Image (spheres, rainbow, N blue to C red):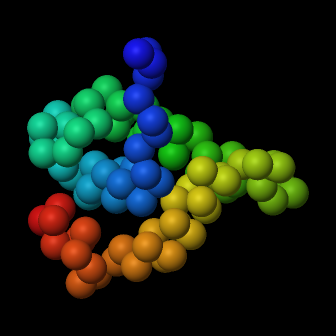
Amino acid sequence: MPKTRPPYPPQLRARLIELARSGRAPEELGRQFEPSAQTIRNWLKQADRDESAVRDSPRGPAPGAGCRQALGLVSLHLAGVGPGSAFAEDVK
């Protein structure tokens, strides 16, 4: 039996980061969705680091910086997640 679980879908991660940044507590999100509150806090820290690397670089983003966020946004777009989508309704 594996010791870890498969990664969460990027669109779930991006949506939970967005909800946490809008004021919802990681503990509340952890109870409503599967990722633990600590996992959500780790995702928030990583997203902050990725955005900081892109924003603070004098020559633009470092290679690979912000790629997790970009992947998440592309995944959301391809999955059709946004205002009015079925997933957006589930998280309200």
Residue 36 position, x and y percent, is 26, 30
Q: Quadrant of the N terminus?
A: top left
Whether residue 57 is visible here, answered yes or no, is no
Q: Quadrant of the C terminus?
A: bottom left
Query: What residue appears at the point 65 percent right and 52 percent down from the top-left corner?
Result: 66
Query: What residue appears at the point 34 percent right and 77 percent down from the top-left corner?
Result: 82
Question: Is 86 placed above or below 34 here?
Answer: below
Write down the quadrant of residue 43 in the picture: top left
Whether residue 9 is visible here, answered yes or no, is yes
Query: What residue appears at the point 24 percent right and 84 percent down from the top-left corner?
Result: 84
Residue 2 position, x and y percent, is 45, 18
The one nearer the camera, 21 or 39, is 39
Q: Report the side of 20 relative to 67 (left or right).
A: left
Q: Report the side of 29 relative to 38 (left or right).
A: left
Question: Is 38 placed above or below 63 here?
Answer: above
Q: Report the side of 17 relative to 57 (left or right).
A: left
The one nearer the camera, 52 or 15, is 15
Write down the quadrant of residue 22 in the picture: bottom left
Residue 39 position, x and y percent, is 36, 31
Write down the quadrant of residue 40 in the picture: top left
The one nearer the camera, 72 or 66, is 72
Marks counted in the figure total 0
Q: Residue furthest bottom?
A: 84
Question: Is 57 placed above or below 91 here?
Answer: above
Query: What residue appears at the point 20 percent right and 45 percent down from the top-left corner?
Result: 33
Q: Residue furthest front?
A: 1
